[in-house]
Image: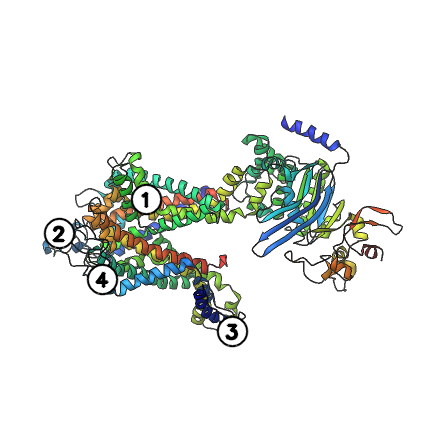
């Protein structure tokens, strides 16, 4: 117990050194303070940090080459669950490749697709939504109708068609397909948000003071309109990862030599009776990843949603 | 109501034309040659390639191709499979299976999702609500293929309640398991949306009125609360149909249900690009029609929309 | 058949002498929230007889609506909690009844009219359905019968073209018409008592009078008891028989309506009357009671009104005043007049 109190003491000192309450905190800062106290956020953030570490430096976690197959070691060699961090920890797949190593290396594709698609749709869709909401009139009409048309194409179905056109598919083709089809979701959110903010008095005031269009848009409207977009984007991130895995599973997403959990799930399905572990580990990893991002999205929404404040 | 339907139908025409235009240009304008893609990694024989291009109408200008393509669509020609069958015929055969599967999934996700959401919303913060939140979070996080294999493994391989794959695709009993997998994707969203909506509407003034009228509890909840709380859920179902279609490809593939999704799954695996596009266009059409139905349902539920 | 029987028993009940229709005795209600315990109602007593109109007057937070909701049995529990008291309806304590017994009283014997008809009517059900529901639930009427009765009711509250509008939805009516529908709903089963919670506050001034007149007229016609809850002294003058003024969960003064207007016996009532704008006061500054309504989490010691009172003494700051019987200068009791002020004599006669 005394130990605990000792540890808490500096934290309290930091807390008292914080800016005085009369100094207004921005919504972002406020949300951050709120987030730090949520266990859901802490757990998901820790998982995500670990996943990003897997993605950046997989060799730190395994010394085994995930692409090196030794056919003598195929999936009939049972995993040895006591061989922590070793090649046979979770057994071998059909081509004798270490399932553990592939689990670690598979994080890269998922994380890159998730983050890049989210960034892409947020920038592209957000910009379109901001222009539509800010200018209104015929600009809004055109953007909104185009948005409607894209909404007529379910994400997975559309991605099938787009990816079909690529002879060789890399992470970037998947990112391209998902951004090209997914940006309209953010456009709708941003447009609605901008229209609400645009009518606020401080925007009128800024305009009256002679602020230019770009200044009003990025300095006055964007910071106040971005919260719902961030919420939707964080929640969507997990969904994009799941979509990539599904596409790869269907055989139209990523291809060898890219390592993707979706591909591994697909190849493991043939041996589901004899070697369920070959399916279990990539599938579990994928689910935990999606779970982490969706939990993060949940926490961010609770922290940012003005309705709950 | 008639005017509302007519207006929605008219609005759908440009959306459909725009949607297929987007699909067309996405497949033709991309880097890479759709015809060459047919040969996969192997280099194509130039003569064969030219013949193929001619047969598929790819040897004319892009504008011309677009006009031909739209003309084909409007006359109901959605292309052919490599085996020479018309896409529309293949879909016509497989559609009844998929419709059954989708309806089963829909009923499952609605009934179970709304029930969970209703009890969660009524008992917010209690043990049931908390476990429902965790359960739905897990369900949202598990991608369809994974969920499919979990179900297949548990119910077919471990418990042996059913055969791992569907033997007779028109048999409703055999379709239950795939339908549960398919419905589970959106079940969690339906449950969560219902929960929020119920909790919000519980505080509404008209609920107080309903109690003050002396209505029994089941009528207060069944007629007044549930009816209002279903409005956002129905809106969600409209956008969710797309996810259901995507999910159907995976689910039908895993359980070998002989539906549209399965045909599409095979077309992908056989690398039949044109067939895939043809299928998708038809599915988009089905999707738009289905979302129109949901839209109408929405108007039935909410008179404020109907008479707006 | 049932209705005829109900009516005879109801008529018989009315003949029992000396029993008021509704009597609230020493009612205490509190709310337990994160911020503490809010004492919303602290020993309220009032009664209404058949054919009588009681106006309950008070600011928001005075406990007037909470009392009404407790009578109706529509208080949210938790966080609300009745800690003491009785609510006697025809001599029977409703707080001791089962949920089912209370439900059968709601709507049929005691009905309520709410402030905002737009939000109080269900937006997705037609007004005909919502009116007809009363007959279907309480009398087992068929769909068709219920609809016919709904039209009849709409006619009775003078909604034009009732038969054509019966299938319309609340948002298709004007504010005044919607409030008429609320009134029709309350009247549907000819209850013994109607509680109207700020029935005209949400309406335009011109419509207010029409709706109020309609309510008063129907009340007289059916010989119902009426509890009219309002913060607006102007509304009650013409329709009420007696007034109970509430402050911080207590009744501070009761009086027959005209006597209260003429000679208030509580400084709070006096302040309220002085703060009504009048034409003959043109040019003068309008009086306003100083200070803020009391914080229910921390009601002041002594008389709850003392921090805002112009005449408060040390006694007022320490001792809660009882509800005194008010007398005239000669010491003769004034019927129905009570005041919870230590200085009621000075206030009334001074």
Find out whether the residues at labels 1 and 3 contact each other: C-beta distance under 8 Å. no
Q: Which mark is residue A209?
A: 3
In the visual, does A284 lie left or right of C221?
left
Residue C108: x, y in percent?
A: 63, 35
Find out whether the residues at labels 4 and 2 contact each other: C-beta distance under 8 Å. no
Can you tell which of label 1 and label 3 is closer to the viewer?
Answer: 1
Q: Secondary structure at mark 4?
A: loop
Can you tell which of label 1 and label 2 is closer to the viewer?
Answer: 1
Give the residue at mark 2.
B51
**Residues at marks 4 and 2, CA–CA distance in whole angstroms:** 51 Å
Residue A308: x, y in percent?
A: 49, 57
Residue name at image x 27 percent, y 42 percent: B152
Label 4 chain ID:
A
Q: Spot the residue most to the bottom.
A: A210
Find out whether the residues at labels 4 and 3 contact each other: C-beta distance under 8 Å. no
Q: How dense is the environment of label 3, judged by Cα within 10 Å: few (below 14), some, or many (20 and up)?
A: few
Q: Who comes first in sequence, dot 4 or dot 3?
A: 4
Q: Secondary structure at mark 3?
A: loop
Label 2 chain ID:
B
Observer-nearest of A130 and B57: A130
Q: How dense is the environment of label 2, judged by Cα within 10 Å: few (below 14), some, or many (20 and up)?
A: few
Can you tell which of label 4 and label 1 is closer to the viewer?
Answer: 4
- Is residue A111 visible in the rendered image? The answer is yes
**Residues at marks 4 and 3, CA–CA distance in whole angstroms:** 60 Å
Give the residue at mark 4.
A62
Can you tell which of label 3 and label 2 is closer to the viewer?
Answer: 3
Observer-nearest of B13 and B183: B183
Give the residue at mark 1.
B182
Q: Secondary structure at mark 1?
A: helix
């Amino acid at each position: 117990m005394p130990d605990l109190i000792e540890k808490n003491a500096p934290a309290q000192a930091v807390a008292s050194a914080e800016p005085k309450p009369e100094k207004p905190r921005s919504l972002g800062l406020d949300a951050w303070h709120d987030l730090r106290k949520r266990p859901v956020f802490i757990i998901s953030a820790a998982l995500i940090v670990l996943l990003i570490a897997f993605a950046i430096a997989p060799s730190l976690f395994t010394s085994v080459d995930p692409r090196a197959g030794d056919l003598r070691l195929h999936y009939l060699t049972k995993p040895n669950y006591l061989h922590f961090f070793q090649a046979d920890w979770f057994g071998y797949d059909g081509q004798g490749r270490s399932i553990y190593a592939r689990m670690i290396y598979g994080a890269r594709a998922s994380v890159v697709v998730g983050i890049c698609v989210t960034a892409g749709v947020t920038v592209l869709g957000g910009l379109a939504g901001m222009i539509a909401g800010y200018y209104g009139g015929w600009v809004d009409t055109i953007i909104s109708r185009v948005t409607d048309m894209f909404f007529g194409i379910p994400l997975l179905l559309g991605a099938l068609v787009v990816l079909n056109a690529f002879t060789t598919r890399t992470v970037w083709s998947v990112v391209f397909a998902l951004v090209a089809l997914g940006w309209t979701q953010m456009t709708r959110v941003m447009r609605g948000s901008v229209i609400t903010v645009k009518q606020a008095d401080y925007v009128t005031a800024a305009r009256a003071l002679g602020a230019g269009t770009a200044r009003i848009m990025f300095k006055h409207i964007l910071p106040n309109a971005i919260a719902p977009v961030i919420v939707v984007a964080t929640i969507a991130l997990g969904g994009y990862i799941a979509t990539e895995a599904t596409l790869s599973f269907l055989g139209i997403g990523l291809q060898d030599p890219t390592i993707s959990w979706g591909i591994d799930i697909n190849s493991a399905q043939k041996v589901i009776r004899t070697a369920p572990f070959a399916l279990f580990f990539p599938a579990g990893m994928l689910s935990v990843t999606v779970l982490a991002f969706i939990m993060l999205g949940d926490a961010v929404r609770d922290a940012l949603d003005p309705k709950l404040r | 109501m008639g005017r509302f339907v007519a207006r929605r139908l008219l609005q759908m025409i440009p959306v459909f034309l725009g949607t297929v235009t987007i699909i067309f240009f996405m497949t033709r304008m991309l880097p890479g040659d759709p015809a060459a893609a047919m040969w996969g990694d192997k280099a194509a024989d130039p003569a064969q390639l030219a013949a193929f291009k001619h047969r598929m109408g790819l040897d004319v200008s892009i504008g011309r191709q677009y006009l031909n393509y739209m003309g084909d669509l409007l006359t109901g020609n959605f292309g052919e499979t490599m085996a020479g069958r018309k896409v529309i015929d293949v879909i016509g055969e497989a559609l009844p299976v998929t419709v059954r599967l989708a309806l089963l999934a829909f009923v499952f996700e609605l009934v179970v999702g709304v029930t969970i959401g209703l009890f969660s919303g009524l008992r917010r913060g209690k043990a049931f609500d908390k476990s429902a939140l965790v359960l739905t979070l897990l369900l949202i996080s598990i991608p369809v293929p994974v969920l499919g294999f979990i179900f297949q493994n548990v119910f077919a391989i471990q418990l042996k309640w059913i055969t791992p794959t569907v033997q007779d695709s028109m048999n409703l009993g055999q379709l239950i398991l795939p339908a549960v997998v398919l419905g589970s994707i959106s079940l969690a969203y339906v449950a969560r949306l219902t929960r929020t909506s119920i909790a919000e509407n519980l505080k509404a003034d008209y609920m107080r009125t309903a109690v003050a009228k002396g209505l029994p509890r089941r009528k207060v909840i069944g007629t007044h609360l549930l009816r209002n709380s279903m409005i956002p859920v129905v809106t969600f179902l409209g956008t969710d149909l797309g996810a259901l279609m995507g999910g159907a490809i995976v689910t039908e593939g895993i359980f070998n249900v002989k539906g549209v999704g399965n045909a599409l799954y095979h077309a992908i695996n056989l690398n039949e690009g044109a067939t895939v596009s043809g299928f998708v266009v038809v599915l988009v059409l089905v999707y738009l029609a289905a979302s129109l139905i949901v839209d109408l349902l929405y108007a039935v539920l909410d008179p404020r929309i109907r008479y707006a | 058949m049932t209705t005829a029987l109900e009516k005879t028993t109801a008529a018989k009940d009315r003949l029992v002498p000396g029993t008021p229709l509704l009597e609230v005795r020493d009612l205490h209600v509190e709310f337990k929230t994160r911020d503490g315990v809010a004492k919303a109602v602290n020993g309220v007593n009032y009664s209404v007889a058949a054919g009588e109109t009681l106006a309950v007057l008070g600011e928001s937070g005075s406990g007037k609506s909470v009392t009404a909701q407790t009578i109706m049995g529509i208080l949210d529990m938790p966080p609300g909690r009745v800690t003491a008291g009785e609510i006697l309806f025809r001599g029977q304590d409703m707080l001791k009844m089962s949920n089912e017994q209370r439900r059968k009283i709601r709507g049929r014997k005691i009905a309520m009219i709410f402030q905002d008809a737009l939000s109080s009517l269900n937006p997705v059900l037609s007004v005909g359905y919502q009116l007809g529901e009363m007959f279907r639930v309480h009398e087992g009427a068929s769909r068709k019968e219920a609809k016919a009765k709904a039209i009849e009711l709409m006619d009775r509250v003078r909604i034009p073209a009732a038969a054509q509008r019966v299938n319309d939805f609340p948002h298709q009516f004007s504010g005044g018409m919607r409030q008429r529908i609320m009134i029709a709903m309350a009247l549907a089963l000819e209850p013994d008592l109607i509680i109207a919670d700020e029935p005209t506050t949400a309406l335009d001034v011109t419509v207010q009078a029409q709706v109020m007149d309609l309510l008063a007229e129907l009340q007289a016609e059916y010989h119902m008891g009426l509890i009219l809850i309002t913060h607006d002294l102007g509304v009650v003058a013409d329709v009420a028989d007696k007034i109970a003024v509430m402050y911080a969960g207590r009744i501070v003064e009761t009086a027959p309506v005209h006597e209260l207007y003429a000679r208030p016996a509580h400084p709070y009532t006096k302040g309220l009357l002085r703060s009504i704008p009048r034409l003959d006061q043109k040019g003068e500054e309008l009086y306003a009671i100083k200070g803020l309504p009391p914080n229910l989490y921390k009601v002041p010691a002594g008389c709850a009104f003392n921090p805002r009172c112009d005449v408060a003494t040390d006694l007022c700051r320490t001792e809660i005043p009882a509800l005194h019987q008010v007398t005239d200068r000669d010491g003769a009791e004034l019927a129905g007049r009570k005041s919870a002020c230590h200085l009621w004599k000075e206030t009334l006669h001074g």
